[in-house]
Amino acid sequence: MTDIHFDKEKGSQLKLFTPGPVHVPERVLKEMAKPNDTHRSKPYSEMHQLVAEGLQKLLYTKNECLIFTSSATGIMEACVRNLVKEDEKGLFFSIGAFGDRWYEIGVTNGKNSVKEGVEWGNPITPEFAQEALNKDKYAVVFIQANETSTGVYNPIDEVAPIIKDSGALLCIDATSSMAGVKIEVDKLGIDVCLASVQKCFALPPGLAVCSISDAAVEKAEQVKNRGLYFDFIGLKKRHVAKYQTPTTPPIPQIRGLTAQLEYILNVEGLEKRFERHEQLGKHTRKWTEDLNLEMFPEKGYESNTVSTIKNSLDLDIPKMVSLLLEKGYRIVNGYGQLVNKTFRIGHMGEIQIKDLEKMLKVLADIISDLK
């Protein structure tokens, strides 16, 4: 097996095609290395404001956009703690490991939590959503846009209106799709749309963001025991008053996000960025077909940011991953119950088609030798 260790001099030299963290471009690393003022200074507030306004454009929303010092799981927990009262029920749609995680967050926080799931590889269809919603009255509905474990993209544009028609608040985990796939928050009536930055944003981990509706804030004001660190009310109060956070944030990551939003919005452009990710997904699916492999997701619901591929050729996946590491590339095994049954290729962030083609050629040769 490949023997790779921490390199304190050069850092990692691997080219990452993983579902996150992903490759961080040199221009972002340089931006993060610049000196910063404190998180209670005017320069910081100006930077924070740029991020908030950039996120609003990215998400097509007028809702406030908040910054969290955590991974996306922190905001997932914030949604549970802030939006579900003791006498209410939350509905957790699950199509994989991270949908299951959100449900587990609900249970461990003592909330009345109901999970409605489908077989891994399948999406939440409008019909399934409607049937689940008809069973009971739910105050909040939680659902993934992109399920990182299965490589399935839920038909959010079709499901969101059904959820909103039920009268529930809608929370969407867009961790592995935000900044790679178009999400129109206001059009869909999404109350909380969340993500962390180590995936499509192509930043180092440690920072998470979300949009939050007025309805979600009003609901949070009615909920007891919201906690302190992830309290929506405290976060929004500091954000609106001074474009700051209640506690010390990772300022270098926020500087990097400022630069990256500028690049996404004004250099590459939103539509071109979404189109590039779509092409990356299509190219990987074509490669999979050409090698007589099979995609894990149900046809038509494949993700454009992470491809989960069935081990239909009965490959030694750990060996395949190790051999690819020797060539300087990292992909990953399947997640959770899909270990060795699938492998995953991340194609998000700043990856270009030519980068993907080069890696897939190397991987194809390795698979040919392993068969």
Image (cartoon, rainbow, N blue to C red):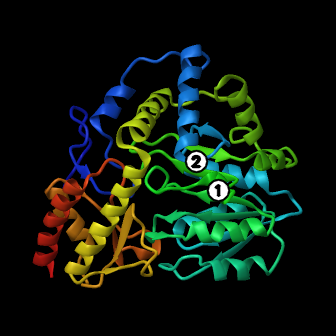
Q: Earlier in the sequence, mark 2 or mark 1?
A: 2
Name the element at disc 2: loop
Is 242 rendered above or below residue 323?
above
At which x and y percent is residue 238?
71, 28
Q: Which residue is mark 1?
A: 187
**Residue at 53%, 72% in the rendered image:** 96
Name the element at disc 1: helix
**Residue at 68%, 22% in the rendered image:** 242
Q: Which residue is mark 2?
A: 60
Which residue is nearer to you in this view: 62 or 12?
62
Which residue is nearer to you in this view: 349 or 9?
349
At which x and y percent is residue 105?
67, 60
User: Around disc 1, counting alpha carbons within 10 Å, would you say few (fewer than 14), some (14 to 19), or many (20 or more)?
Assistant: few
The circle on residue 10 is none
Label 2 and label 1: CA atoms lie apart by 8 Å
Is 55 rendered above or below residue 332?
above
Residue 30 seen in this snapshot = yes
Residue 1 seen in this snapshot = no
Q: Give the amino acid type for the residue marked by disc 2 in the picture.
A: Tyr
**Residue at 75%, 31% in the rendered image:** 237
Q: Give the amino acid type for the residue marked by disc 1 in the picture.
A: Lys
Is 268 rendered above or below residue 84?
above
Classify residue 327 by image quadrant.
bottom left
**Residue at 59%, 51% in the rendered image:** 194
Q: Is residue 170 left or right of residue 282?
A: right
Placement of the N terminus among the 4 image quadrants: bottom left
Which residue is nearer to you in this view: 218 or 337?
218
User: Around disc 2, counting alpha carbons within 10 Å, would you say few (fewer than 14), some (14 to 19), or many (20 or more)?
Assistant: some
Q: Is residue 25 left or right of residue 325?
A: right
At which x and y percent is residue 77?
66, 52
Classify residue 28 by image quadrant.
top left
CB under 8 Å between discs 2 and 1: yes
